Image (cartoon, rainbow, N blue to C red):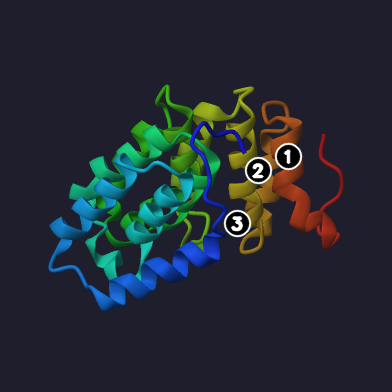
Amino acid sequence: MKSTMPFHGVAVPAVRRIVRDLVRAHPFANADAWQAAILSLWRNASHREERYAAVELLCIPQHLAWITPPRLPLIEELVVTGAWWDYVDAIASNGVGTMLRSHPGKTKPALRQWAKHDDIWKRRSAILAQIKFKDATDEKLLHTVIEPSIGEREFFLRKAIGWALREYSKTNPAFVIDYVQNHADRLSGLSKREALKALLRQSVVGAVP
């Protein structure tokens, strides 16, 4: 793990249990108090697990209704200042994904902007936002958020593209096969391998250039 922030050595499942137990024992009065707690944990963290706790607090099931478009600056701060996959992937799939499900009309334009941003972690978040959507995936949006990064050499973008396509291949293999074939000359080898991994295991698709 690349990190200048030290670890206590507490595993993520234990952090999750601690956060959920504390929230049950001491519920937040409102969304503003919840956001203030997240930011306090995040900004004042001395160890990485404290930031993991902030991410867990953001995505805790009983407060998913509070992840609304006005909270986008909160999520953006966590993504940009976190700037590593262990934070960003959970924030994208649970935080950004929750907002996209509940408020697509206001969230999609933001993700289209994030997909073109200079910050690779905002781009990765846009690509991974639908990672758990299955048959609710907006294929047009997926195509749109991948497009600005399809030719990038950055590992975390190439990996995200492949991962997003691989997960959707479990729901709509034809879409992913067509996408990879139609963009074979632009997708990196890593993105193609990741995109087709689940299908190749099932022998659903042959080799793609």
x%, y% of residue 209? Answer: 82, 34
Q: Secondary structure at mark 3?
A: helix
Residue 153 appears in view: yes
Disc 2 residue type? Gly
The circle on residue 208 is: none
Which residue occupies 53% across, 45% down? Answer: 7
| Alpha carbon distance from label 1 to label 2 | 6 Å
Q: Secondary structure at mark 2?
A: helix
Q: Closer to the camera: disc 3 or disc 2?
A: 2
Q: Quadrant of residue 141?
A: top left
Do the numbered discs 1 and 2 sit on residues whose CB atoms are within 8 Å?
A: yes
x%, y% of residue 161? Answer: 60, 40
Q: Nearer the viewer, residue 89 or 128?
A: 89
x%, y% of residue 59? Answer: 37, 61
Q: Read off the residue under disc 1.
A: 192
Position of the N terminus, as image quadrant, is top right
Q: Read off the residue under disc 3.
A: 168
Ranked by sequence position, the earlier of labels 1 and 2 is: 2
Disc 1 residue type? Lys
Disc 3 residue type? Tyr
| Alpha carbon distance from label 3 to label 2 | 10 Å
Residue 135 appears in view: no
The circle on residue 162 is: 2
In the displayed structure image, the side of residue 85 where residue 70 appears, left or right = left
x%, y% of residue 115? Answer: 43, 33
In the displayed structure image, the side of residue 178 where residue 77 appears, left or right = left
Q: Nearer the viewer, residue 55 or 205?
A: 55
| Alpha carbon distance from label 3 to label 1 | 13 Å
Label 3 Cα crowd, 10 Å radius (few <14 / some 14-19 / many 20+): many
